[in-house]
Amino acid sequence: MGVEATSTGLHPSAGVARRRFVDRGPRIVGSTVGVGVLGTLVVILLPSLKFAYSSTETHVAIETAAFLIPALAAVLFAGRTLRGGSRTDLILCASLALIAGTNLCFSVIPAAVDHEPGRFSTWAPAAGRLVAAAGFTLAALLRPGRLSAPNRALVRTLAVTAAAVALIAILAGLFADDLPRGVDPALSPDDARHIKIVGNPVVLGLQLTTLLLYATAAIGFLVRSARERDSLLVWVALSASLAGLARLNYFLFPSLYSEWVYVGDAFRLAGYVALLIGISREMLAYQRGAADAAVFEERRRLARELHDGLAQELSFLRTEGARLSGTSDRGVLRMATAAERALGEARMAISALTRPLDEPLDVTLQRAAEIVAVRMDARVELTCSGSPDVRHGQASVVRIEIDATDGLRVRITDDGRGFDTSADPRRDAFGLVSMRERAEAMGGDLRITSKPGEGTTVEVLVVDAQPERTR
């Protein structure tokens, strides 16, 4: 379900996982289609196996899920439309709302009232689902664009959707007696010895047309997911592909319009489950983004308090210390020096509090390394490939390499004095122990290579790691 550059406020680690899922999207959808086609062939070639049973209640349950899940997804895409103003999100919202309204008005309610499917229960939902499938295809193939007034466009579109449901209901109700029976409700798959392509030719044509629309939509959403790096589109493509498989099975045996629950119904339900998983993950991402925004706002409030309070007082003390720099009183000089250091620490704290929570790892490392390098009169060269501290050892150049293309590998090399790695560490040498413990806590391996006078190389390798947000 398309979105043009819609920000979800994800953690960097979550963003990496979603991008990897997007890269695997074609393989996931292709495997699903392959398994679905194989299952369909098994049903066709092995009619002695029992895959069907008669249950009106199960049909009602499936139709209820087919109403609730698209309705929830329509609400999600309505929010995306209001936030990002995407035409694609608007069309998807309308298509999902049409599916929800169609399944509720033309399937759930009639099935609950009348246990025997009639002409209205055949033609009204068929028309609504065909229009909704066309909306999916339009959303998948439509070029990205922005709405000038998202609120007004959303209200108008939902009004048109509601009018479309009402119009279909009126027309189907008026001409129900004149419409042909779509399929015999008493048709049973139990005695099938061959493919049962039965029913009104128009109904069969609608199933094939809907199949082609969903297949086109699935391909379009996969292309858009790769271009926009939106993992939700993969779930929508998966849902569309399962819906297409359901239409294929409904063409072979139209259990959608009978009391029998058959393979097509299983594929249709699986498509809605895939959609539910996708929107659930998206809502969790929104919650994480909202939590991050709240934390960032609190950090900015603390930064303002520090700037307007403590930093101002320390700045005054530093100024007074500079004015008394000619004094011989050592206590005054120590106080002035302490105030200068405290002001520097306060400014660093303010800077850290006002940085974005999702600042890229390479930017954070670059800043941290440059702070240390400036103090020690060294130069930092940072190389980072993929999208995932330094102690002074008399180094003039510090190189940091990050490779997040396959797991996470961080290598820090300097040309400092180095040290003997075989010597027993000092009791107060907690730095190396802490580094090793942190690497092991992530399931990684810490390697240190160094010799006196030949610099030091520190390398951390974590397989299948996802870079965590810097703190």
Image (spheres, rainbow, N blue to C red):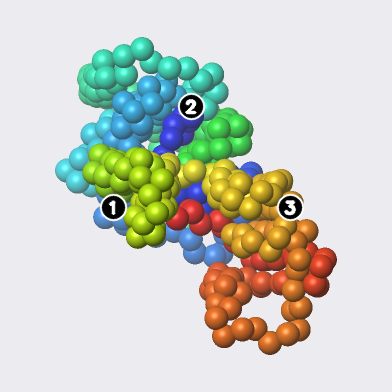
Residue at x 48% of width, y 61% of height:
51
Q: CA distance from mark 1 to mark 3?
A: 71 Å
Q: Which one is in front in this view, the residue at disc 2 or the one at disc 1? A: 2
424 on left or right of 354 = right
Q: Which one is in front in this view, the residue at disc 2 or the one at disc 3? A: 3
Judging depth in this view, the residue of 93 and 163 nearest the camera is 93
Residue on which the image places disc 3: 396
- What is the quadrant of the C terminus in the image? bottom left
Q: CA distance from mark 2 to mark 1?
A: 35 Å
Give the image location of residue 144, x and y in percent.
Answer: 51, 20
- Give the mark nearest the N terminus, 2 or 3: 2
Judging depth in this view, the residue of 294 and 117 nearest the camera is 294
Give the image location of residue 6, x and y in percent.
Answer: 44, 32
Q: Which image quadrant for residue 91?
A: top left
Q: Which image quadrant for residue 305?
A: top left
Residue on which the image places disc 1: 61
Q: Secondary structure at mark 3?
A: loop
Q: Which one is in front in this view, the residue at disc 1 or the one at disc 3? A: 3
| Residue type, mark 1 in image | Ala
